[in-house]
Each structure stands twice: as C-alpha cells, then as structure tokens.
Image: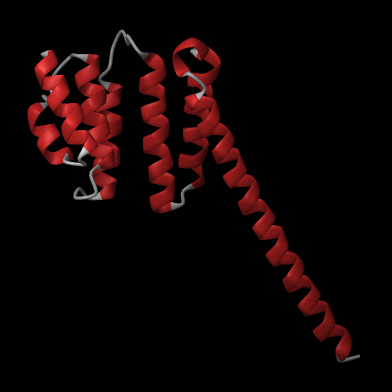
Amino acid sequence: MTSEVKKKILKLKAQHKYDEARALLNENSTDNDELRALAECNYKDLELHKDYSYAEALKLLDKIKDDNNPSETLCLRGAVYKRKWEHKANIDDLYESIKVYELAYNDYKQDDKDYGGINASYLYDVIANHIKAIFTRARKKSKNTSRRHYSKI
C-alpha cells in the first residue's frame, strides 16, 4: 500500500466513508496495516449489518501473521468485541474485549500508550455498574415483597 493510498484511506476514515476506504483495500492482502485498516472499516461502518461487520473484522484480524504492531491489533480486536457486546449484550463478548485490552496493556505497554488499560478499566466500570444496578433492583423488589407479605399478617 503506497503512502498516497494510506493518506486517502485515513482521510476517508476521518469522514466516516468506510465503504470508499474498503474499496481501496484488498481483503486478500498479507499486509498487516492493510488488514487492520480493513477490519476497522468493517466494524465501524454503520451501513453494514452489525453481525456481518463484526465477524468480518475479526476474520481479517485473524489473518494477521508475524504482527508488526500487536498492540494495535489487540486493541482493534477489543474494540470489535466491545461493539459486539453493545449490540447483543452477550457477556462473553465483554469478557473477551477486556481480555484482549488487558493483553495489549500488559504485554505491549510501550506501544499501547495506555489505550488497552484505559479501555479495560472502563469495561470493568461497566460491569461494576451493571452489578450495582442488579443488586439495587433486587433490594427494591425484596423490600416491596416483604411489605406486601407482612401487611397480610
């Protein structure tokens, strides 16, 4: 991929023209940067069906061999799983996202620039807030049930 094409792709991504950026990229490429860019254009494109775009992005990231930027690849993978969780609310996607963000942060601190750590921390906060909401609802329900039960006695 030439530097001219890279600049054009960056510009298109900034304008959220992911379909046009994808058209400049080759899904059969073995270039890691091209595969990462293509994965990003897939998972961020709101015009694509979410299930398809997330699966396609992960498939493209799986093609990366001898990764020259593993932190970036892991953080992209974490972002895709985070979006999958936002879309389907499957807790396994949330855990997978945290796992790869933590891996990027712990194993590639120099390259990660805290991106993976910040995202993992945010997702732990999300989990904590969900648990807190569950306990709050359960406590309210329990109090209401107790009042109704004792008022009949």
- Residue 89 relative to residue 147: left or right: left
Which residue reaches farthest bottom?
152
Q: Residue furthest right?
A: 153
Q: Picture quarter containing residue 39?
A: top left
The quadrant in which residue 5 appears is top left
Q: Position of residue 117 (x, y in %)?
A: 54, 26
- Using the image, determine if residue 136 lies above or below residue 79: below
The colour scheme used here is secondary structure
Q: Which residue is depicted at the point 23% across and 36% down?
A: 14
Say whether residue 25 is left or right of residue 54: left
Compared across the picture, whether 15 is left or right of 139 comes to left
Residue 153: x %, y % from top left: 91, 90
Between 52 and 6, the residue placed more toward the observer is 6
Query: Residue at the location (13% across, 40% down)?
Result: 19
The residue drawn where x is 28% and y is 39% is 43
Along the horizontal axis of the image, is 73 left or right of 127?
Answer: left
Please tell me whether residue 129 is drawn above or below residue 25 in the rendered image. below
**Residue 23 to residue 72: above or below:** below
Q: Quadrant of the N terminus?
A: top left
Q: Using the image as rendered, state which of residue 129 and residue 114 is in the foreground.
A: 114
Q: Which residue does the image show at 74% across and 71% down from the upper left?
A: 140
| Residue 65, quarter of picture | top left
